[in-house]
Amino acid sequence: MAQVLPPNVSPERFSKALDEFAAIIGKEWVLTSEEDRNTYLDPFAPGNADEHASAGAIAPQSTEEVQAVVRVANKYRIPLWPVSTGRNLAYGSAAPVLRGTMVLDLKRMKRILEINEELGYALVEPGVSFFDLHDALRERGDTYWISSPAPGWGSVIGNALEHGVGYTPYGVHADTICGMEVVLPDGDVVRTGMGGVQGSREWQIFKLGYGPIWDGAFTQSNFGIVTKMGVWLMPAPGAVANVVVSLQDENALAPLVDTLRPLRLNDTINATYTIVNPYRAIIDDARLQGQVRADIYSGPGVLPKDVIARELAKRGKSPWSVNFNVFDVREAGLDLRLEAIRSAFGKLPRVNIDVQRWRAGEPRPGWARVDPGLFALGIVDWYGGPGGHMNFAPVCAPIGSRVVELYELIHRRFVEHGLDCYLGMLNSGNRGLILNAVMFFNRNDDDLTRRGRELYARLAAETAALGYGDYRAHISFMDHAAAMYTFNDHALRRLNERVKDALDPNGILAPGKQGIWPAGLRSFRKTGDHS
Amino acid sequence: MSVHGRPLASSVLLVLAALPAGLGAAEPKLTARQEQGQALYRSTCLHCHGERVWGTFTLGRRLGANNALLENRTDLVRPYVEAVIRKGVGSMPPYRRTELSDAEVEAIADYLSRNTRAQ
C-alpha cells in the first residue's frame, strides 16, 4: 500500500507533524508502517477498505498527551479520528470516514479509575473494554452487573458514545453516562456536569449540573475527545427470567408489537427485547450449529419461502418470536411480572411461551446476556468468508401497523436486491424501536457487496421520504444517514456544522463523522439531500 | 453438569477425539513465556477459538475437526501465528500493537507452537 497522506498536507509537512507527535508520546506509539496501518482498516469493509485508509495512528496514554497531540494536529492541519478500542465492528471498526485521517487510538488509556460500590458507578478511560469492566466487577463479587452489547469486544465509553444497546434495564448505554472529561478540538479540556466544579465528589451521581447538558453533544459527534466517563452500574438483581414468546402465525408481527408496547411502557418488561424475523431465526440457529448459508441453500436470490418454512420447522423455530429478560430485586416481584406477561401474550393465537429463571446465588446463565462474549460475530460468515456486514437501522414507534408497513418495505427491497433479510427489532428505552436490518456479504463477492451498498442507499432515501431516520451508520454511509434528517432543509445538520465550525475552526477532529463536516472539507460530503 | 448445553462427558470425549495422536498423554511443563502465552490466549483468543464457537467452526470447515482447536495443533509455527495475529485471516480482524505488544504476540505464538517439533 502506498503512503496515504491527509488531504492538502505535503509529505514534508506530514513528516514534521509525525516528529512532533513522536516527541510527545514516543516514536513507538506513532504507528505509520504499512503493517500497522493495515490493522486500522475496516476488517468488514463493504467494498474497498482502502477508501477509508488512515495515514497512520497515534496512541497517547494520558489526557495531557491527547491535549498536546491535538495542538500539533491543529498546527499542521492533520485530521484525527479518535477511537476507544477501535472495535466498532459493522460501523467501520477503527477506520475514519475521510481517507488520510490519522487514527487517535486511545486503547492505551485503559484504567478503571474508580468503582464506587456505595453509589453504583464506575469512572473509566476509553480503552476499558466490557471484558475489563466485567472482570473487575467479578473480582468484587458481582454486586453490580454491566450491560454488554453483542459482541462485547468494544469499549464501555465507545459503545455508549455510539448509542449502543445492551440487554439489561441499563441497556440504553448513552443513558448510563454521567459526567465526562473531554479534550476539545483546540486542546482545551473540560469536565461536564458536576465535574465543572473543582474538587466535586458528585461528578458521577448527578447528570444535570448547571446549564446545558453537554454529555449528549459529545456522543455520535466530532466536537471533542472523551478521555474519562462516568457510567452507572446496575445493582445485582435478586431474580431474572428469560422469556421467549414464539408465534406460528406469519402475520403475527403487528399483534406482537402491540402486545409488547404496554408491557414495556409500564416497565413490566424492564429490559431490551429483540423481535426476531424468520431469516434471523434460521441464521442465528445455524450459527449455533456452525453452519453457513451454503449448508442450507445455494441457489440464487434470497432464501425461498419453501426453504424458510422447511428450516424453521426443522429447527423448531417460528416465523416470529421475541426474546427478552425480566429483572427484579426479589422472586415474588418476578412472579408478578411473569404473570402479567403470560396473561398478555396468552391471548394471542398459536403462541408458545418459554420461561427460564435464575435466582441470586446460582451461576449466572448465558441467556442473561451480561457476561460479554464474541460469539455473535460468527454470523458475519453467513455468505462464506471472508465475511462482513453492515446495518440499516431506522427508528420506528412500536405501533403494530407502522412497524409492519416499514418492515414490509425493507423486506421487499432486500428481496429485490437479493440479500437475505436478517432483521431484529430492538427497543431502545421504553418507547423507541430500532429495526436493525443486517446486510451480510462475502468480501470476495464484489457483486453481493455492491448490491448491499445500493440497498442501503435506496432504503435511506425511501424511508426518509416516509419520515424515518437511521440511528447509526457505517462510515461509508454516514452522509446518507445524516441526509435522512430533512426537517427545514436539514436544519439539524446546519446546527451541527455551526457548532463544529465554532469548536473546531481548523476542522481537525473526525471530519465527516455522523455527516458533520468542517467548513474546509465539506466538498468531501458524499451525497445529495433527500427531500 | 453441562458445557455449552451438552453433557460434560460428551464434551470431554469430543476434545479427546480432536487431540492428535500422542497428545492425550501429559504435556511437558510450560516455560514461563508459554505460560504467559497461555494466559493471554485464554483471555484474548478463546472467545472465538474455544469449543463450539466461531473460529473453531471456521477452522473445522477448512481443515477438519482434528485441526479446529488451536491449542491442540502440532503444526503451528511461530512466524505463522504471529502473522495471523498481526494481519488477521479470513474474517478474523488483526490485533494492533495497542492491543497486544510484540512480546505478547510472541508469547502466544510460543504457546501455540509448543507441540510443533521442527521449526
Image (spheres, coloured by chain):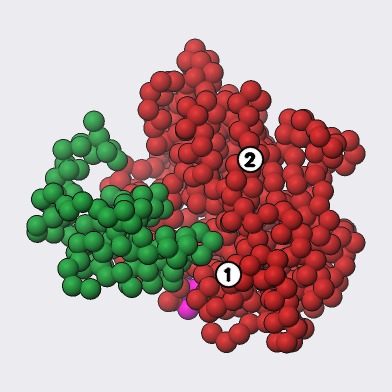
Predominant SS along the magenta part: helix
Instruction: Give the percent coordinates (x, y) of residue A136.
Output: 51, 37
Instruction: Give the percent coordinates (x, y) of residue A528.
Output: 76, 73
Chain whose colour in the figure is green: B
* Tag in front: 2 or 1: 1
Highlighted range, magenta: A446-450
The answer to whether residue A199 is magenta is: no
- Apparent side of residue A267 relative to residue A336 in the rendered image (left or right): right
Of labels 2 and 1, earlier in sequence is: 1
Q: Which residue is mark 1?
A: A28
Answer whether residue A195 is visible to the viewer in this image: yes
Chain label for disc 2: A
Amino acid at dot 2: Leu
Is A358 above or below relative to B34?
above
Mark 2 and mark 1: Cα distance apart in space: 25 Å
Chain A: colour as depicted: red
- The answer to which of A513 and A143 lies nearer the viewer is A143
Q: How many marks?
A: 2
Answer whether residue A98 is visible to the viewer in this image: no
Please check whether the numbered discs 2 and 1 fall on a single chain: yes
- Apparent side of residue B97 relative to residue A304 in the rendered image (left or right): right
Q: Which residue is mark 2?
A: A113
Q: Quadrant of the C terminus of chain B?
A: bottom left
Residue extending furthest toward the top: A332
